[in-house]
Amino acid sequence: LPLARPLSLAVSDAGFILVMDYDNNRVLLLDPSLRYIRDLVSRDHGLNAPYRIWFDERHGMLYVVEHPAGTNVMVFSLK
Protein backbone atom coordinates (compact mmCIF):
# COMPACT_ATOMS: atom_id res chain seq x y z
CA LEU A 1 0.00 0.00 0.00
CA PRO A 2 1.65 3.30 -1.03
CA LEU A 3 2.08 6.09 1.49
CA ALA A 4 -0.71 8.64 1.58
CA ARG A 5 0.22 11.86 3.41
CA PRO A 6 3.10 10.77 5.66
CA LEU A 7 2.92 13.64 8.15
CA SER A 8 5.27 12.50 10.92
CA LEU A 9 8.16 10.11 11.51
CA ALA A 10 10.56 8.87 14.15
CA VAL A 11 13.96 7.21 13.82
CA SER A 12 15.32 4.58 16.20
CA ASP A 13 18.93 4.50 17.39
CA ALA A 14 19.51 1.60 14.99
CA GLY A 15 18.21 3.65 12.04
CA PHE A 16 14.78 2.05 11.67
CA ILE A 17 12.14 4.55 10.59
CA LEU A 18 8.58 4.72 11.88
CA VAL A 19 6.31 6.58 9.44
CA MET A 20 2.88 7.90 10.33
CA ASP A 21 0.68 7.46 7.24
CA TYR A 22 -2.34 9.75 7.77
CA ASP A 23 -4.69 8.73 4.94
CA ASN A 24 -4.03 4.99 5.40
CA ASN A 25 -4.50 5.17 9.20
CA ARG A 26 -1.29 3.35 10.05
CA VAL A 27 2.25 3.62 11.40
CA LEU A 28 4.67 1.53 9.39
CA LEU A 29 8.23 0.40 9.96
CA LEU A 30 11.02 0.81 7.41
CA ASP A 31 14.54 -0.57 7.73
CA PRO A 32 17.56 1.77 7.47
CA SER A 33 17.59 1.20 3.68
CA LEU A 34 13.95 2.41 3.51
CA ARG A 35 12.53 -1.04 2.79
CA TYR A 36 9.08 -1.76 4.17
CA ILE A 37 9.09 -4.25 7.06
CA ARG A 38 5.52 -4.17 8.40
CA ASP A 39 2.68 -2.07 9.74
CA LEU A 40 3.21 -1.49 13.46
CA VAL A 41 -0.29 -0.18 14.19
CA SER A 42 -3.28 0.43 11.95
CA ARG A 43 -7.02 0.88 11.84
CA ASP A 44 -7.21 -2.74 13.10
CA HIS A 45 -5.72 -1.43 16.38
CA GLY A 46 -8.27 1.41 16.59
CA LEU A 47 -6.13 4.02 14.85
CA ASN A 48 -8.14 6.75 13.13
CA ALA A 49 -6.63 9.86 11.52
CA PRO A 50 -3.15 9.67 13.11
CA TYR A 51 -1.49 13.06 13.07
CA ARG A 52 1.80 12.91 15.01
CA ILE A 53 3.97 10.17 16.51
CA TRP A 54 6.65 9.97 19.16
CA PHE A 55 8.71 6.83 19.85
CA ASP A 56 10.09 6.25 23.34
CA GLU A 57 12.74 3.72 22.37
CA ARG A 58 14.02 3.25 25.91
CA HIS A 59 10.65 1.93 27.06
CA GLY A 60 9.46 0.55 23.71
CA MET A 61 6.39 2.78 23.62
CA LEU A 62 4.83 4.48 20.59
CA TYR A 63 2.62 7.51 21.17
CA VAL A 64 0.20 8.50 18.40
CA VAL A 65 -1.80 11.73 18.45
CA GLU A 66 -4.98 11.49 16.41
CA HIS A 67 -6.62 14.36 14.53
CA PRO A 68 -4.94 17.73 13.99
CA ALA A 69 -6.61 19.11 17.13
CA GLY A 70 -4.85 16.46 19.23
CA THR A 71 -8.09 15.20 20.71
CA ASN A 72 -6.85 11.65 21.36
CA VAL A 73 -3.48 10.12 22.24
CA MET A 74 -3.04 6.38 21.79
CA VAL A 75 -0.15 4.48 23.40
CA PHE A 76 1.20 1.22 22.02
CA SER A 77 3.83 -1.10 23.47
CA LEU A 78 6.26 -2.25 20.78
CA LYS A 79 8.17 -4.70 23.00
Image (spheres, rainbow, N blue to C red):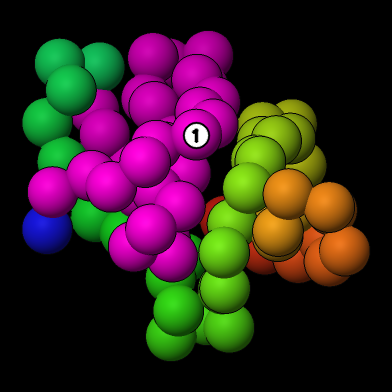
Amino acid marked by disc 1 = Leu
Q: Position of residue 63 (x, y in %)?
A: 73, 50
**Magenta-colored span:** 2-31
Against 75, residue 20 (above or below) is above
Whether residue 18 sits left or right of residue 60 in the image: it is left
Q: Quadrant of the C terminus?
A: bottom right
Q: Position of residue 57 (x, y in %)?
A: 66, 32
Against 18, residue 67 (above or below) is below
Count of labels shown?
1
Q: Which residue is mark 1?
A: 7
User: Within 10 Å of the Cα at label 1, are there few (<14), some (14-19), or many (20+) other Cα atoms?
Assistant: some
Q: Position of residue 48 (x, y in %)?
A: 57, 73
Residue 79 seen in this snapshot: no
Whether residue 64 sits left or right of residue 48 in the image: it is right
Q: Position of residue 25 (x, y in %)?
A: 43, 65
In the rendered image, residue 25 lying in the magenta stretch gets the answer yes
Q: What kind of element bears circle 1?
A: strand
In the rendered image, residue 19 lying in the magenta stretch gets the answer yes
Q: Quadrant of the N terminus?
A: bottom left
Residue beneath the point at 43% across and 85% down = 44
Residue beneath the point at 84% across and 66% down = 72
Whether residue 30 sits left or right of residue 19 in the image: it is left
Residue beneath the point at 63% across and 47% down = 51
